[in-house]
Image (tube, rainbow, N blue to C red):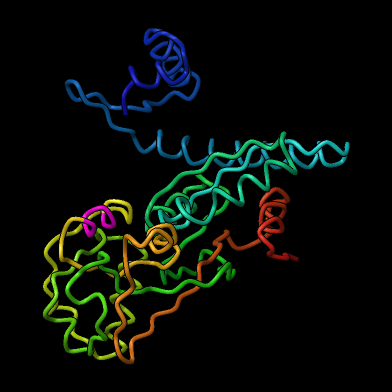
Amino acid sequence: MSFTKAAQELHISQPAVNKHIQELEQQLSTKLFTRNGTSIEVTSSGKILLEKSNLIFEIYREAEFEINKLNNKLKGNLKIGASTTIAQYILPEILVKFHSYYEDIHIELTSQNTDKVSELLKNNSIDLGIIEGPFQSPLFDYIPFISDEIVLVARTGHPLANRTLAMKDLHDIDLISRENGSGTQDFIDSELRKMKIPTTEFKKIMNLDSSEIIKNYLLHSNAMAFLSVSTITNELKYNKLSIIDVKQFEIKRQFQFIIPKGETPELVKLFMKTCGIMTQ
């Protein structure tokens, strides 16, 4: 929503951006933007053009990939949106493997929470989503990826680090939570409700928007947090954080690929195959 930033990203001048927009508006006989002082908004016509342009680029990427595949030369662009936990802790190793196989396929990875990844896929801004939340929509197919477990975590040396807690003890500890819209947090809250644990009675002292920030906070406090075991591998290895045992407490989940219903693009199939997922 800034002509100046658009010009910087495209490495052209701002007058050139203005000229391109004016030419588009003349060609389509409509306004694409309304200007209110220093701010701009996309018009209804502009939204239609944006939506259809995204579809055009998607079809172009598929055509480019399939033609290169026909010529035994795998090239193309793949846009992936992944929940924060998956993007930070699961995907890097897979991306290295994929690039070693297909170095001419360019990947763009966007890290967002589950809600935003789903929205990006709905708007055709990405080709493939990988999420950690229980989000379900009739627009998408959901394909299981890998399993994960949620555990209660505190710093090593915490007064309760070597104790086994009862469920009722969860109401007495200071808890750090993820932000609203976090797939991890939504899943945790849902599972706790199934266990008849009233989360409204928890002492949630703070919401932080990433596992990294939460881990660093825990290292300097007596607070605890529910975290994916995938996010604390190094901290457990170097004895910085500890898993707190809670009687009769177990939260497991499945990370999922999400793709629009219908025919799956070949490039998406190729990436999922690299992840060990076989598609039709």
Picture coordinates of residue 248 (x, y %)? 33, 92
Which quadrant holds residue 220? bottom left
Residue 38 image position (x, y, % from top left) = 19, 21
User: Which of these two is toward me, 104 or 28?
Assistant: 104
Q: Where's the N terminus, which quadrant?
A: top left
Question: Residue 195 vs residue 83: left or right?
Answer: left
Residue range of the region highlighted in magenta in the rendering: 214-219
Task: Give the x, y percent position of residue 234.
Answer: 43, 57
Number of numbered markers: 0
Q: Is residue 40 above or below residue 11?
A: below
| Residue 201, above or below 95 | below
Q: Quadrant of the C terminus?
A: bottom right
Question: 49 or 65: which is nearer to us?
Answer: 65
Name the residue at the right extreme: 71
Give the quarter of the image for residue 22: top left
What residue is rendered at 22% in x and 89% in y? 167
**Residue sitting at 13 percent across and 70 percent down?**
174
Q: Position of 134 compared to 127: left or right? A: left
Quarter occupied by residue 246: bottom left
| Residue 11 percent coordinates (x, y) | 46, 13
Predominant SS along the magenta part: helix
Residue drawn at 63 percent across, 44 percent down: 96
Image check: 216 left or right of 272? left
Q: Residue drawn at (36%, 38%), measured in percent from left and top?
A: 44
Q: Is residue 25 above or below residue 74?
A: above
Asked whether 20 falls inside the magenta stretch, the response is: no
Closer to us: 198 or 64: 198
* Residue 147 vertical position relative to residue 93 in the rendered view, above or below: below
